[in-house]
Amino acid sequence: MNAWLPVLIPATSLIAALIIFFIKEENRGLRTFVNLTLASLKVLLVAFLVVGVSQNKDYRFTLALFYGFELVLHADALSLLFVGLSALLWLVTTIYAIGYLDVSQEHDKRRFFGFFSLCVSATTSIALAGNLFTFLVFYELLTIATYPLVAHRGGPDAIKAGRVYLLYTLGGGALLLVAIVWLKSIVGAANFATGGMLIPFVVSHQTELTIIFTMLIVGFGVKAALVPLHGWLPVAMVAPAPVSALLHAVAVVNAGAFGIIRIVYDVYGPDVCTQLGVRPWLAAAAAFTIIYGSVRALRQDDFKRRLAYSTVSQLSYIILGTAIIGPLATIGGLVHLFHQGIMKITMFFVAGNLAEELHIKKVSQMNGIGRRMPITMAAFSIAACAMIGIPPMAGFISKWHLGLGAIVAGQEWVVVVLLGSTILNAAYFLPIVYRAWFKEPDVAFDPPPNGRKLEIHPYLLIPPLFTALCVIAAGIFAGMPFSPLEWTKLITLKEYGP
Amino acid sequence: MTHSSILIWPVLLPLFLGTVMFLIRGRSVLLLSLAAAVGTALTSFNVCRIVHQSSTLIHEVGGWGAPLGIVLRADGLTAVMLGLSGLVGLVISVYSLTYFKSNSRKEHLFWPIWLLLWGGLNGLFISGDIFNLYVTLELVSLGAIPLIALAGTRNAIKASLRYLLLALLGSMSYLFGVGLLYMRFGVLDLVMLGNVITPDFTAYVALALMIGGLIIKAALFPMHFWLPPAHSSAPAPVSAALSGLVVTASFYAIARLWFYAFPALELAKLSQLIGLLGCGAILWGGWQAIRQERLKTLVAYSTVSQIGYLFLVFPLCNTAVEGSGIAWSGCILFAVSHAIAKACAFLAAGVFIKVYGHDSISKLRGAGRQLPMVTLAFALAGVSLMGLPPSGGFFGKWMLLKAAFVTGQWGYGVVMVCGGLLAFCYIFRVLEQFMTAPDENAPKVKAPAVMTYSVLLLAVAAVSLGFFTPVLLSVLGVDSPVSLVSFAPEALLP
Amino acid sequence: MSTSLIYALTGIVIAGLGLFHYLSQRNILRKILAGNFIGTGIFLFLVSSAARQVDGPIDPVPHALVLTGIVVAVSATALLLALVCRYHDETGSLTFDEENDE
């Protein structure tokens, strides 16, 4: 049983995908049933796993493929952080997507939900991957499975976005392939291990390891949207709202960031990274991305593009956390992986609601929108405040630990970056909040159609509300066991030793 | 002695039933062809299974041993190839049951020749001597070319004529090499030849003639020019057999000679030359594929490109370097994966032709919504051709790449990755059209279920091949010319 | 110079002549004839290798090979000629370099 649990978790989504592909397009009820059942099942399994791992149980599945190549799925504390996030948000987003696709009357629902589940399966496998080889396998799978979702609507801009997305990610994937094969030809087969596995090689292969590290960071940096590799993310926003929400705010981008985390902590190891002298460079890249993304976000009138640039910026908090030496920064970076996910998905749900209900896609059209859609905008306001870092919400926890960690490590400049970014965050989110609540509407908004009491279809209303509550809870209850913060502390404890 | 006779059935059965099929018409054609296909596939799988369980099978036909008799031999490599031809051949046959339904004349001609071709292929795989290789190579050519001409179009006739003229030149060259070797060493048996051969002038000339002749047949760049017109103008199931099996068989013959008959020769320089040609094939074929307007020509150029990867095994599998043996298993895995994926791609193209009446890429927009399953199958085949996980293409490429690193031949690694990127471009050029929303008033279309699902089956096989790598490699390991175990990564650790 | 060597060299010369015409002729019928020349040359070469020792017994294997080779060559030629007929019907030409192709 312990061996099969890590397989079962990705398998639930995979099975969902396979079944959905063979369900007829018109058979909406059955598809919804399959989706929700398996998504709930997955959450249950993850909860079970979380309890198990916190009691130091070992969950490992190994499939020897050929000499020296093993497919390893291993549930450690770090992987569960990502698995938990994706499982929870899969359920939420599935509910949202069911409502969304019905309201907007999209075509090809079968394809949409099939590939959607496939993406989640790939994401959880990435999280559970026990070595670089497995990681790469599912990383590429995620790339491919996302393509039909990005290009889903089939219009010229969707096709173009798909092309841009592929050019970036497959290019990055090719680089990763070379880097990983190269690394393996030096190291041989090796699973992820806390503290890294390269210590015996660092003296003899210093140059090679540095080059490989750079290639790996660039390869993962594409999905983690490190500037200048971020170009695909704003373009990919033509995808339907649930795709932007789950994939481009959480799964795909976090997969990239997660890759960098794995490289730094479990392949190279913090000490080797320090020895090779690569951490300052990584920190500089992350800091630049944070500022650059925020500045670009400031000038976007398209709501989703503004959110996309915000994602670019926020993701680099995670990378920054890995680049700074010391446990506090590690905690800050890791916990932001979770926090960024729930905050940003709330915002994308909101963006989807506005676009679906009122066809509002631009910030400049949002005057007075709070009166027409109060609950939706309340959710947005919560997420925005959290993103800016107003205590006691989720974003504050991440920034606090990052800043403290930087000071402890003697890198005060990071605090300056954080402050600057916070001001910029406020500058591009608060005007939206202000417009929504305090400005008079320019035009009269359409009332809800034929007597519906709620501001929007309930399937579209519950998910943002739920995630907004999560954002608050993650901050307020940060000290409780199993909160994201406590969980990252557990991870960090393992990484740095007691 | 008795149980080794199972070797002859994958050859005898299709040849015999093919001959019978010439004579019959009407309803029974369907039944008999299905029986022949299933029987051939099952006997092939059976050989595969027995080889895996015991070891190399050797059968002396009629009890006459070498040098006078014909010796059939099935080792691990043969078993893999037989399994491949069994799988792909079976699917092609099932697909063809529907494909040729509307045209009874073509159907009547297709089955005997296809069975002849299939039998010839299986014969080639179990040949134990270099002359038998010649005969079966000819049998394959003589089966393949009428099948291309079966399309009946002017382009098809022209392409098949060209192909035959070139193939003839290739076989003459090969036969000349056989003559030289026999004159010098007095043996034809592959294993015996490997034992007695000495590196002298005659041996090198013979090698050059034989490999050169086979390179024409395997369509290695720059001798590839006959392939795209031939493979794209043939009927779809035939294209699938040609790109999937026939080209692979020619490559098989080269690998057989290289690793079994000529190991005593100093081949480093020649292997670099072939490697360069392989690189040329990868890049040129990929580049040309991007520029094609028709789906089948695109897939055909993709074959040119993918063939190039196979030939990289010669420079990469250098027995002097420990760990480079991984190139051998990578190459065979790649060959199998390519054969399945390419057959799938051509069969999918055949469905489009059947449904829309053309295969012009720019007019296939919206196919994704109209024929979702076939599109999915094509996409999955594409995943394998691009070398993305978990397809066999990915693992094959991974192993070849690793060999490039282990032997320090970076250039080949770079070319392989570039070839993969070119494959992304040409596959997604097609997929983009499929993803594009169709016109609102586009007529509803439907593909025959048998064709759809046989294509899908191959697609799933191609993509999930990665998970069957252990089985495939343990079959391949039976009497392998290079050690498959010694390069366990522990050996690489300092 | 032994007799068998003369035969072998003659075979090579014939095959070489055939090859030259095979590559240089544009008319397909001539190409086919040239192809048969190559074949004949190689068969002659093969048969000559049957005399392994000057006065010793004749090796039967090359004869078997040549017989098989002739059968193959005949079938290939027949197929070629049939295809040429079809090609001529379709295009009215006996060369590949006709205009308005495709």
Image: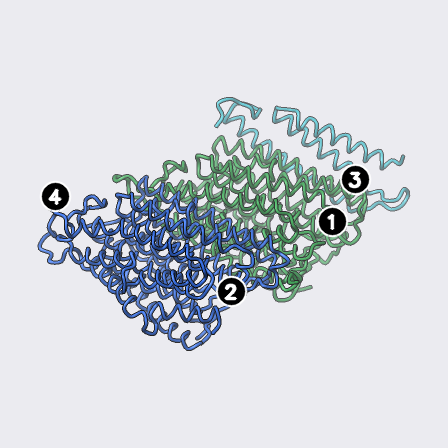
Chain colours: A blue, B green, C cyan
Instruction: Write the residue at 26% across / 43% down.
Output: A301
Furthest toward the left, the residue is A451
The answer to whether tags 1 and 2 share a subunit is no
- Of badges 1 and 2, nearer the viewer stands 2
Question: Could you say which is closer to the camera, residue B456 or residue B30?
Answer: B456
The amino acid on which the numbered mark 1 sits, given as a three-letter code, is Phe
The answer to whether tags 4 and 2 share a subunit is yes
Determine the image quadrant of residue B360.
top left
The amino acid on which the numbered mark 4 sits, given as a three-letter code, is Val
* Residue at which label 4 appears: A443
The amino acid on which the numbered mark 3 sits, given as a three-letter code, is Val
Instruction: Write the residue at 37% across / 46% down.
Output: A292
Name the quadrant of the C terminus of chain B: bottom right
* Residue at which label 1 appears: B262
Does dot 3 land on a helix, a strand or a loop?
helix
For label 4, count other residues whose C-alpha is less than 10 Å away and answer few (under 14), some (14-19) or many (20+).
few
**Horizontal side of residue B106 vs C59, given as left or right:** left
* Residue at which label 2 appears: A192
